[in-house]
């Protein structure tokens, strides 16, 4: 097995706890978390990872206080602005998964601009899961198939065909999932795509996650034996 997985997915948990431990507002944890994401993305590009997916905002996160949601959305806008500015200089391709309803027009426009400006870049592909839930994605895919069947197109639905109706169409499934902050669950993230993914959990809060922590995780990945259900 290659030392470097092709696709690494991150659940960036623990921003709030990181901030609380420092008597800071939760927003400070998210701010530091977004800086860490920038650093980790750069490092992933450097070491030859081809796809990174970051769970940035879940369909469930809307139940947080409005002030916190506004803070995360404003960090997201800053991130998108910065990525748009650097889109020609960096060879990174950006894609966003999740549903657009509920997001502001300004964020939707920035997502479209960034996706279109980076679509021909050939380097690392960064996938942001924004307003994303695995169940919601599967239901949206099912409804798209239903609409096609109702319009007269007939299908024998296979996993490959089903995958093509998901937001992640064309993106290989993650090889490795890293979740920070000690929780041992997947929280509605990539439910379909994580079928054979190797999981890695660390107690570190996301704002403390470093390149060295990623190296340690990758060292563990290389020792895993992936069998994809075979003997
Ligand atoms: C989990 O921490 C993190 C999130 C809900 C959102 C992830 C957001 C970021 C990493 C920052 C924003 C990044 C961009 C690109 C906008 P938590 O708040 O659930 O932490 P807790 O479990 O300790 O409370």
Image: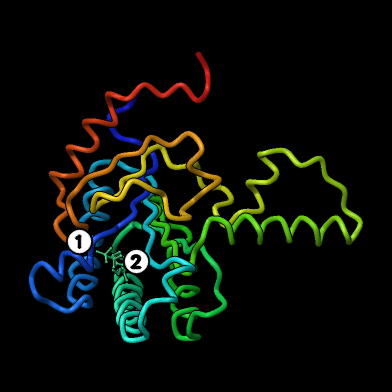
Residue at the outermost right position: 152
Task: Give the camera-side residue of 48 and 136.
Answer: 136
Q: Residues within 10 Å of mark 2 (few under 14, many from 20)?
A: few
Disc 2 target residue: 88
Ligand 1, seen in the image, is in the quarter at bottom left
Task: Give the camera-side residue of 96 and 229.
Answer: 229
Residue 36: mark: 1
Q: Residues within 10 Å of mark 1 (few under 14, many from 20)?
A: some
Q: Position of residue 61 (x, y in %)?
A: 41, 71
Q: Position of residue 112 (x, y in %)?
A: 50, 73
C-alpha separation, residue under disc 1 versus residue under disc 2: 22 Å
Mark 1 residue element: helix
Residue 207 in the figure: left or right of residue 148:
left
Q: Quadrant where the N terminus lies?
A: top left
Task: Give the camera-side residue of 168 and 21.
Answer: 21
On the image, which quarter does residue 13 sit in? bottom left
């Amino acid at each position: 097995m290659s030392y470097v997985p092709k696709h690494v997915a991150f659940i960036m948990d623990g921003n709030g706890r990181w901030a609380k431990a420092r008597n800071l507002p939760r927003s400070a944890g998210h701010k530091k978390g977004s800086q860490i994401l920038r650093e980790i993305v750069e490092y992933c590009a450097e070491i030859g990872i081809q796809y990174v997916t970051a769970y940035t905002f879940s369909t469930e996160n809307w139940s947080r206080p409005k002030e916190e949601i506004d803070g995360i959305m404003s960090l997201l806008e800053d991130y998108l602005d910065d990525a748009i500015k650097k889109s020609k200089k960096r060879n990174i391709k950006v894609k966003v998964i999740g549903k657009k309803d509920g997001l502001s027009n300004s964020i939707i426009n920035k997502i479209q601009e960034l996706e279109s400006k980076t679509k021909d870049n050939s380097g690392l592909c960064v996938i942001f899961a924004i307003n994303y839930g695995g169940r919601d994605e599967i239901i949206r895919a099912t409804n798209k198939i239903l609409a096609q069947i109702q319009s007269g197109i007939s299908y024998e639905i296979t996993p490959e065909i089903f995958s093509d109706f998901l937001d992640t169409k064309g993106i290989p499934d993650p090889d490795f999932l890293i979740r920070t902050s000690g929780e041992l669950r997947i929280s509605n993230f990539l439910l379909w795509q994580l079928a054979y993914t190797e999981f890695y959990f660390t107690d570190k809060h996301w704002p403390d996650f470093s390149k060295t922590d990623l190296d340690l995780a990758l060292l563990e990945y290389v020792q895993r034996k992936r069998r994809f259900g075979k003997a």
